Amino acid sequence: MHQFLVPNMTCGGCLGSITRSLQKLDPQAEIEGNPQTRSIKVASAKTQAQLLAALSDAGYPAQTLPQQDT
Ligand SMILES: [Cu+2]
């Protein structure tokens, strides 16, 4: 599980774009996001660097948050 802070994610539409971008990278990815806190959780086998690159390419550069244990 990866957690990111995405400052540009301001509404559900942004979350939809982010979800599509990450699922293009990894069709199995599961994304949960909260536009209020501008944070997303991503369950994916891709590396953090790959996810960050996909987010940046989509126009949503992200910062990492501490990883959860599960
Ligand atoms: Cu938006």
Image: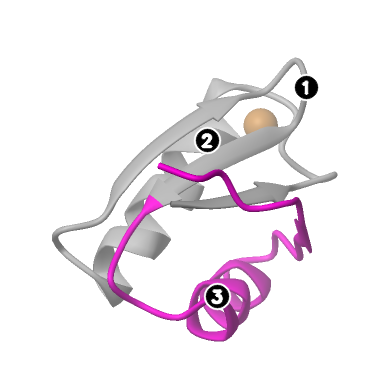
Q: Residues within 10 Å of mark 1 (few under 14, many from 20)?
A: few
Instruction: Work out whether mark 3 precedes mark 1 in sequence or the reverse, and give the earlier one.
Output: 1
Of badges 2 and 1, the one in the foreground is 1
Find ligand 1 in the image and state its quadrant. top right
**Label 2 CB-ligand 1 distance < 8 A:** yes
* SS class, disc 3: helix
Kind of residue sitting beneath label 1: Thr
Determine the CA span between mark 3 and mark 2. Answer: 18 Å
Identified at 70% across, 59% down, the residue is 60
- As drawn, the label of residue 15 is 2
Check if residue 48 falls in the magenta segment.
yes
* SS class, disc 2: helix
Which residue is denoted by mark 3 in the rendering?
A: 48
The foreground one among 24 and 67 is: 67
Left or right of residue 32, residue 35 in this image: right
Kind of residue sitting beneath label 3: Gln
* SS class, disc 1: loop
What is the magenta range?
43-70
Determine the CA span between mark 2 and mark 1. Answer: 12 Å
